[in-house]
Image (tube, grey):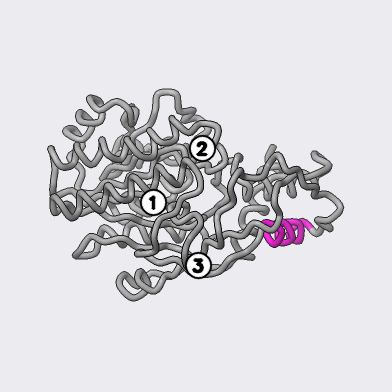
Amino acid sequence: MLITGITGQDGSYLTELLLGKEYTVHGIVRRTSNLLRSRIEHLRRDDQIYGKKLFLHYGDLSDTTTLRRIFREVQPAEVYHLAGQSHVGLSFELPESTCDEAGMATLRLLEIVRDQAPDVRFYHASTSEIFGNASESPQWEETPMHPTSPYGCAKAFATQLARVYRQSYGMFVCNGILYNHESPRRGEKFVTRKIARTAARISRGLEVDLVLGNLESKRDWGRAQDYVVAMWLMLQHDQPDDYVVATGQTHSVREFVEAAFKVVDLPWQKYVRQDSAFDRPIEPARLVGCVDKIRKTLGWKPSGNFEQLVREMVEAEVEALKKS
């Protein structure tokens, strides 16, 4: 089994899930990755796992030659393609690299699978950002794509490519159309991690305020730990397909802030200020997912709730500060 983006939030949780199911896991990492601070460092330090059930391979998604070599060496039965620049706001600043990593890299991998191992089961990490200014709410698998960011455009391209390869070549390719999913392992550039981290630091007297953009922006936020289970279930089904993975509920940034400061028992209004510099050039419409299909077909549903997610993130930040 092979994972791209194994050192990311989803990749680390997926690795733990698969190791627990007795998989041998191979992951692709860049040579520039700082593995000593990665989310899988606890696995790399385990002599019973690393080098026995977990193997890392240096490679870059722009390097087709190396990717083909890795596929030949590993001969995976399942591929989980999670890698790529996934920060929506940053995609406006880095549109070309975002489109290459999210779009063209998917094409390269699909071509390698088609040439070398057409029976491989391939998971592509799509996103709710493909819907953007959605024509309907909630969105489901057949909702038209109207992306509003370079990241959303690149993912729409990759999602359509995955469908084309499935339909044209009979390949087992699934799109997981995942809505926002968070955890204590979320990158620090994402607003949820920023809120959790700053709330914890303010509670310890290490910061004095939290600067955010549009507080009324709403998202369908779930737990990453739950969503990687959905990825695995897609590749265990007898037929490849596309699935929306979401909670079916939306919450605003303001609600996230309120819940985060409640964990540290502080009045959020005293510390939060807005700055339009953090607003997106275009804000997508109300993105909320319909999970009827994945619930009925694969039996998946999210565990926990919004308040639990926020609490997990803030408490993890508080614990990290205590240790430091």
The residue drawn where x is 31% and y is 56% is 21
Q: CA distance from mark 1 to mark 3?
A: 16 Å
Q: Earlier in the sequence, mark 1 or mark 3?
A: 1
Question: Which residue does the numbered mark 2 point to in the structure image?
Answer: 91
Tell me if residue 175 comes above or below residue 84 in the rendering: below
Comparing 52 with 211, the one in front is 211
Name the image quarter holding the N terminus: top left
Q: Position of residue 4 (x, y in %)?
A: 34, 39
- Name of the residue lying farthest toward the right: 270
Tell me if residue 182 comes above or below residue 220 in the rendering: above
The residue drawn where x is 54% and y is 53% is 182
Left or right: residue 86 versus residue 101 is: right
Question: Which residue does the numbered mark 1 point to in the structure image?
Answer: 126
The residue drawn where x is 38% and y is 47% is 15
Question: Which residue does the numbered mark 3 point to in the structure image?
Answer: 247
Which secondary structure is most common in the magenta stretch?
helix
Front: mark 2 or 3: 2
Residue type beneath disc 1: Ser
Query: Which residues fall within the magenta stretch?
Result: 253-264
SS class of the residue under badge 2? helix
Assess disc 2: are there few (<14), some (14-19) or many (≥20) residues with their C-alpha within 10 Å of its C-alpha: some
Instruction: Confirm or deny contact between disc 1 and disc 2 (CB under 8 A).
Output: no
Comparing 36 with 138, the one in front is 138
Q: Is residue 262 magenta?
A: yes
SS class of the residue under badge 3? loop
Instruction: Confirm or deny contact between disc 2 and disc 3 (CB under 8 A).
Output: no
Q: CA distance from mark 1 to mark 2?
A: 15 Å
Residue type beneath disc 3: Thr
Residue type beneath disc 2: Ser
